[in-house]
Image (tube, rainbow, N blue to C red):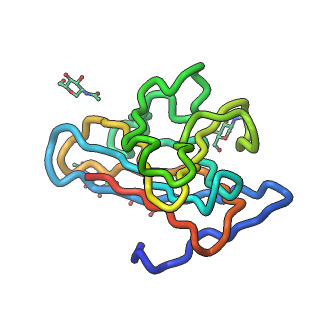
């Protein structure tokens, strides 16, 4: 989507998640990086991400991600990039147990004023189509930004 496009609306109550789905076609065989970036208004107006999935539709729909629903006790499979020093409030994004989609844990993008990043690597095969889907909720305002990229 163009970076200027608004694709998610925000709510404060009730918690309303929206599902996003995109196809990615691998242009070579090897490892790729899935990256989410979140910028919050402040630690109270944030993003929530849950139930992330990458399905290889050319390989019987196998799931490529580890711990895409964040239900492991820690962020197994994922890395948070960018330290809390870049976040104006000092609070960076993390695994949380509040306002999640349909289970116990989710990821909260809480970095004020700057992006911080959530990463996971996975292997792709040239020509295969991968369907990325995830559920997103924000209780922020129009100044907040988020993006997702596979490269
Ligand atoms: C992804 O590609 C498949 C196969 O072409 C198609 O059926 C599906 O609707 C596409 N999904 C999206 C989100 O574009
Ligand atoms: C949570 O949502 C995901 C994505 O829709 C779904 O695959 C999964 O079955 C749901 N889990 C529960 C416990 O409802
Ligand atoms: C990708 O494939 C290589 C070679 O098979 C393997 O060593 C590596 O662990 C895989 N990486 C991931 C993230 O699956
Ligand atoms: C993957 O699946 C899509 C949709 O069915 C198809 O168009 C494409 O040719 C397939 N790619 C390979 C490498 O088989």
Place of residue 18 in the rendered image (x, y in percent of width and height, measured from the top left): 66, 59
Place of residue 40 in the rendered image (x, y in percent of width and height, measured from the top left): 57, 59
Q: Quadrant of ligand 1?
A: bottom left
| Above or below: residue 69 compared with residue 146 | above
The residue furthest left is 28
The residue shown at (67%, 70%) is 141
For the N terminus, which image quadrant? bottom left
**Of 72 and 80, which appears nearest the observer?**
80
Residue 10 located left or right of residue 124: right
The residue shown at (76%, 65%) is 11
The residue shown at (80%, 62%) is 12
Residue 66 located left or right of residue 149: right
| Above or below: residue 40 compared with residue 100 | below
Give the total of numbered labels: 0
Place of residue 19 in the rendered image (x, y in percent of width and height, measured from the top left): 61, 57
Place of residue 71 in the rendered image (x, y in percent of width and height, measured from the top left): 61, 26
The residue furthest top is 73
The residue furthest bottom is 4
The residue shown at (44%, 56%) is 115
**Of 41 and 104, which appears nearest the observer?**
41
| Above or below: residue 105 compared with residue 16 | above
Residue 8 found in image quarter: bottom right
């Amino acid at each position: 989507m163009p970076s200027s496009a608004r694709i998610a609306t925000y709510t404060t109550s009730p918690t309303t998640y929206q599902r996003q789905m995109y196809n990615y076609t691998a242009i070579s065989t090897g490892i790729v990086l899935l990256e989410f970036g979140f910028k919050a208004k402040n630690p109270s107006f944030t993003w929530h991400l849950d139930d992330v999935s990458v399905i290889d539709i050319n390989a019987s729909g196998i799931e490529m991600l580890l711990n895409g629903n964040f239900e492991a006790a820690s962020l197994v499979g994922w890395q948070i990039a960018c330290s809390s020093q870049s976040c104006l409030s000092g609070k960076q994004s993390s695994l949380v147990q509040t306002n999640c989609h349909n289970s116990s844990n989710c990821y909260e993008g809480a970095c004020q004023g700057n992006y911080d990043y959530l990463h996971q690597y996975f292997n792709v095969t040239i020509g295969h189509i991968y369907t990325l889907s995830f559920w997103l909720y924000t209780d922020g305002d129009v100044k907040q930004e988020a993006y997702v990229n596979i490269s």
